[in-house]
Structure formats: C-alpha cells, structure tokens
C-alpha cells in the first residue's frame, strides 16, 4: 500500500515536472538575477556583462533624480484607483444584463466580448490617436466646458479623466464579464424561486443573495484587472522601464531596480485591494 | 361612483402590469431599460469598429469634405491597397500565425499536463507549488524580462521563435497560470470513476491521461488554445524585445505603420495630398491587422462565449 502511495506521489511529480523546471529556469532564477542586477551598475562590454555593486544607488536614483518615474507612478496609481472599480462594476452590470432572458443574447454576447480580441496595444493606441475613444462630440456640452475650464479640482480632474477615457476603460473589461457571467450561470435557480416565494424583490435579491455569492469572483476580477491594467503595453511606466533598459547611462541595472519597485507597488496594490474586500465581508456577517 | 373608481382602479392596475410586469422582470419598462442599456453599451464597443470600417473606405476627397460623415461617396479601396503594401500583409500574417499558434499549442499542452497532475495526484509540496503557480500570474513580465533577455542571448535564440516557445513549453508563457488553473478546475470537476475503472483494468497513469482524461477535456483545451492564441497575438511588448527585427507580427507592423509608410512613400516636396499618409490609410491598416482575429472570433465565438460555462473557468 505504501509502495503504491509512493508511486502516485512520483507520477504526480512527473506530471507537474515541466512546470517546476520551467519555473526554476524561466521565473525563479530570472527573478533573483534581476534583484541582484538592481543593486549593480551594469556595463555591457565586449567580453560580457560587467557589474559593479552600487548598493541602493539605483533605488535612490529612481526616487530622487528620475522625476519622470515618480510622476508616472503617481499618475498610474491615481488612474488605477479610478478605473479599477469602474471596470468591476461595469462588467458586473453587463454580466447581469446578459444573464437575463433576452432576445439576441448570442449577438449581444458576441459584441461584448469583442474587447478580449482587439485589446492589443497598437490597435488601442491607434484608436486613441483618432479620438474614437472619447464620447462623441462631448466637447459641445456645457458640463464638459465648465470642467475643462478649471481642471485643478480633485473631482473635476476625476470627471475629466473619466469623460476622456471612458471607452478605453470599458474596453478593458472583456474577460471580467466572462468570469462574472460564468459565475452567475452557475448560481442555483432554486434559491431565486425560494426567495421569490418569500416575497423578495429583484432588488433585494441582488443585494442579499447575488452579490454576496459573487464576492469571491469580485476578488478574482479585482486581481485580474489590477494585473492586466499594470502590465498592459501602453502603460507609461512600462515604456519608461523599457527606455531605460537600452539607455547607455542607466542600463540593465537601473531598469531592473525600476521593475522591482514597480513589482512591489503592484503587489502592495493587490494586497490592499484584496484586504479591503475581505475586511468588508467580515463586517457584514457579524 | 363606486363602480367608476373600480373602473379606474382596474385600468390603473392593467397599465401598471403592462409597464412594470407581474414579477418585476417582464414589464415593458423593465425590458426597455435592459434593451436600452444593452444597445447603448453595445454601441460603445461597436463604435470604434464602425468608425474604422467607414474611414478605411474614404478617399482623400471624402476625408476632407466635412459633409461626408458616415457614408463615403464611393467605395474606395485605394487605402487598403496602400495599407496592404505597408504592412506586407500576407507574409506578415503567415509570420504572425507562426509565432502565435505554436506557442499557444505548447502552452495549452503543458497546462493540460500540469493541471492534471495538480488535480489528480497528491505529492509533497503541492500546496507550495499551487501558491507559486498563482504567484507567477502577478509577477510583471518586466521583472524577469532583462535576465531572460540576457539568458536567451547566450542561448542564441533571440530573434527566433524559441524565445516564445521555450517558456511556453515549460509553463512559463503568457498567463500560463490561468490555463493551468482552468485545467485544474476542469479535471477536478470530472468524476474519477472512469479513470479508476481503467486503472483496475491495468492501464498506466499516462495511458489514462492520454486516452481518457484528455479527450474529455476538449472544451478546456479549445478555450485555453483560443485565449492563448489571442493573447500571444496581441502581445507586442515582449515580441518587440525578443524578436527584434528578425520576426514581426501584424500588431508590431501596425505600431511601425507611420514610419514604414514614410519610408515607402517619401513625401514629395511641394506636392500636397497624393502621397501623404492620411487617416483613411491608417484606419485601413488597423482594420487589416485585426481582421484575422475578428474572423477567428466570429467562427469560434460559440466556444469563447459558451465554452466558459463548461470549462469551469470560475472554479468553486
């Protein structure tokens, strides 16, 4: 019996061994190596890569000298705080709509999943350049003009950003709709009928049953949204890292430091987002 | 008097029922709201596509004429001819398929194997491995990019397909973690009975995997392959760095569209119009670069949309 157990143990390891090898070679080692590089000044010479230990020099440089990086990180954080909740709420609404008994459901689904297909950096950039991504002829409205006249206020800034980028934000939400929709379709229809018999309205049903049961999916979507938003190739921070990678005076060492700082920021953002979600959940049930 | 109020009441109820419905979901008002929202939001997604389509058929005269808005005066295909030349469409398309289909296949295959291993077997360190699989999803590619670049440079595979294929084959490709999770969830949801019966009949683990588990996993395989394909297709950041000038993809060509155009059709001094790059040509280029994906999507959309329910993408 024990032999059999060992055997299964080994077979299991055999199945996952490609991943373990790949992880060590293509992820774990590069991760450590880039951490090592981030503390070095890297020079590429004819006989290979020369490194020179500079302690936290690269990190200090990022925060004290390189103004662009700090600016872009702050802007990125601000935009993320606005965009991510909108993407989540919006994709939830669409998933709820698509989950209704409606005509042309297939057609609507086909349209709403288009962003999954088309969302590549160059295409979106082309669309933004053409001005297709703002609400058509918004400039004519008085609200927009009033906002545009004093863009310094906090709420004005947010509103302006929203108006200008609404369509792009919505274009990020393809996969999230898929995930919500799949979860909604798995929900037990009997609960709905039971609640109906007890006299619950649709409104109550949504807040008291649908939403709480979707909470794990909201967290999944939150993580997915933050990650994809952060690694999207149009993200200005990523452009900045890439630019520094091939610059002579900064090079691989500094770019590594930047990517590590960025990684830590993303990790912190994820931790905060997931933390907020779980704290709220505990409160609700006590 | 009494009957009159009753009458009014009856009509009131009837109209109320018509607009708000019996149960709150079948009223006219409710339906109007839902369809209104669906059409409105659908328009937001279709608008850029429509815009692209229309502008790509506009000749220069139409573009300059403020009266021509949504319907071009003539069916002008000159933009496509030029965009086709700039993108070098067919050879680029073949190259794009080459660098997207193969890694997508490799990634799907390895995700199936690893997902099966995680779902069906217990081994030491499984929990740790699970956490690591999830962790690979949140590591931004930029962090591992530089060491991988140096590493690939030493292996001399920069500028070749191996730079994409090798990580994919070992489960470290684009979003590999998601595909492993999809297969993990799928295999966990499938009853073990069939496999146990085969085991009693003396079949080995690998034979069971290939002859029983894998054929059952067809929905998961298809959806993994499609997403993998789309994500590799749309990946321009890594492709630009790993492939350099050796290999190109349609999105990469689109990125360089303006530069390539100016190289191919140098602007003649003093002559306005004619050779100038205009919106129509740019839009034609954009349409061409997403057209293959759109076609794939419309053929396979049943799998994108409905496969998700069956492949257990959400888990429990």
Image: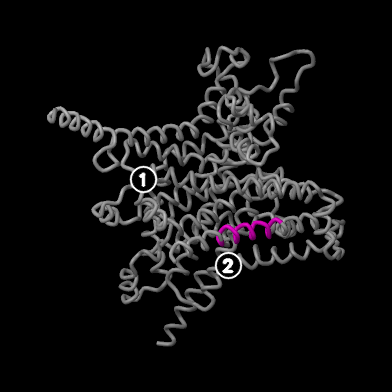
Q: Which numbered dot is residue B132?
A: 2
Q: Secondary structure at mark 2?
A: helix
Question: Label 1 belongs to which residue?
Answer: A99
Residue at point 41%, 49% (across, down): A181
Q: Give the vertical position of B157 relative to B304 (above or below).
A: below
Residue at point 81%, 64% (across, down): A39
Q: Position of residue A197 (x, y in %)?
A: 23, 53
Q: Are marks 1 and 2 on the same chain?
A: no
Residue A100 lies in the magenta stretch: no
Q: Nearer the viewer, residue B95 or A32?
A: A32
Looking at the picture, the colour scheme in use is one colour
Q: Secondary structure at mark 1?
A: loop
Residue at point 61%, 25% (across, down): A139
Q: Is residue A48 visible?
A: no
Is A255 situated left or right of B75 in this image?
right
Q: Which residues are magenta?
A: A262-275
Name, please, the residue furthest toward the left: B3
Is B278 situated left or right of B266 in this image?
left
Name the dominant secondary structure of the magenta segment: helix
Q: Is residue B137 visible?
A: yes
Position of the N terminus of chain A by quadrant: bottom left
Q: Residues within 10 Å of mark 1 (few under 14, many from 20)?
A: some
């Amino acid at each position: 019996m024990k032999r059999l157990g060992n055997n299964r143990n080994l077979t299991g390891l055999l199945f996952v061994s490609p991943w373990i090898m790949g992880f060590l070679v293509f992820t774990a080692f590069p991760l450590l190596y880039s951490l090592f590089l981030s503390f070095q000044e890297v020079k590429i010479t004819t006989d290979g890569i020369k490194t020179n230990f500079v302690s936290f020099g690269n990190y200090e440089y990022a925060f004290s000298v390189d103004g662009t990086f700090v600016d872009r990180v702050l802007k990125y954080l601000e935009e993320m705080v606005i965009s991510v909740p909108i993407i989540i709420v919006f994709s939830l609404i669409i998933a709820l709509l698509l989950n209704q008994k409606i005509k042309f459901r297939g057609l609507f689904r086909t349209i709403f999943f288009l962003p999954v297909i088309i969302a590549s950096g160059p295409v979106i950039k082309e669309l933004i350049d053409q001005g297709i991504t703002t609400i058509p002829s918004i400039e004519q409205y008085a609200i927009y003009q009033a906002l545009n006249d004093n863009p310094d206020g906090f709420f004005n800034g947010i509103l302006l950003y929203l108006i200008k980028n609404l369509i792009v934000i919505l274009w990020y939400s393809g996969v999230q709709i898929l995930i919500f929709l799949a979860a909604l379709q798995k929900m037990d229809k009997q609960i709905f009928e039971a609640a109906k018999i007890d006299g619950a309205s649709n409104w109550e049903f949504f807040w008291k049953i649908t939403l709480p049961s979707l909470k794990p999916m909201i967290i999944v979507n939150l993580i997915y949204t933050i990650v994809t938003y952060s690694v999207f190739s149009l993200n200005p921070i990523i452009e900045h890292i890439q630019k520094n990678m091939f610059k002579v005076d900064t090079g691989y060492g500094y770019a590594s430091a930047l990517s590590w700082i960025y990684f830590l920021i993303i990790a912190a953002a994820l931790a905060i987002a997931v933390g907020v979600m779980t704290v709220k959940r505990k409160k609700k049930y006590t | 008097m009494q009957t009159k109020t009753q009458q009014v009441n009856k009509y009131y109820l009837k109209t109320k029922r018509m607009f708000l419905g019996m149960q709150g979901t079948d009223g006219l008002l409710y339906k109007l709201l839902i369809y209104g929202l669906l059409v409105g939001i659908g328009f937001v997604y279709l608008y850029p596509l429509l815009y692209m389509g229309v502008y790509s058929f506009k000749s220069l005269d139409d573009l300059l004429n403020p009266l021509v808005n949504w319907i071009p005066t003539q069916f002008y295909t000159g933009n496509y001819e030029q965009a086709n030349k700039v993108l070098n469409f067919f050879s680029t398309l073949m190259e794009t398929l080459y660098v997207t289909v193969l890694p997508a296949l490799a990634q799907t295959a390895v995700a199936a194997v690893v997902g099966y291993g995680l779902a069906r077997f217990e081994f030491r360190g499984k929990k740790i491995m699970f956490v690591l699989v999830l962790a690979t999803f949140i590591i931004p590619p930029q962090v591992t990019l530089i060491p991988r670049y140096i590493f690939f440079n030493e292996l001399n595979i920069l500028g070749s397909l191996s730079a994409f294929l090798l990580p994919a084959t070992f489960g470290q490709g684009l979003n590999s973690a998601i595909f492993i999770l999809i297969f993990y969830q799928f295999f966990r949801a499938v009853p073990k009975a069939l496999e146990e019966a085969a085991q009693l009949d003396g079949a080995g683990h690998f034979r069971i995997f290939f002859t029983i588990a894998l054929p059952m996993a067809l929905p998961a395989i298809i959806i993994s392959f499609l997403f993998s394909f789309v994500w590799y297709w749309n990946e321009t950041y890594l492709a630009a760095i790993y492939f350099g000038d050796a290999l190109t993809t349609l999105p990469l060509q689109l990125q360089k569209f303006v530069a390539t155009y100016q190289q191919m059709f140098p602007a003649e001094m003093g002559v306005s119009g004619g050779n100038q790059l205009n919106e129509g040509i740019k839009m034609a280029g954009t349409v061409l670069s997403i057209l293959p994906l759109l076609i794939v999507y419309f053929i396979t959309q049943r799998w994108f949309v409905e496969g998700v329910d069956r492949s257990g993408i959400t888990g429990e």
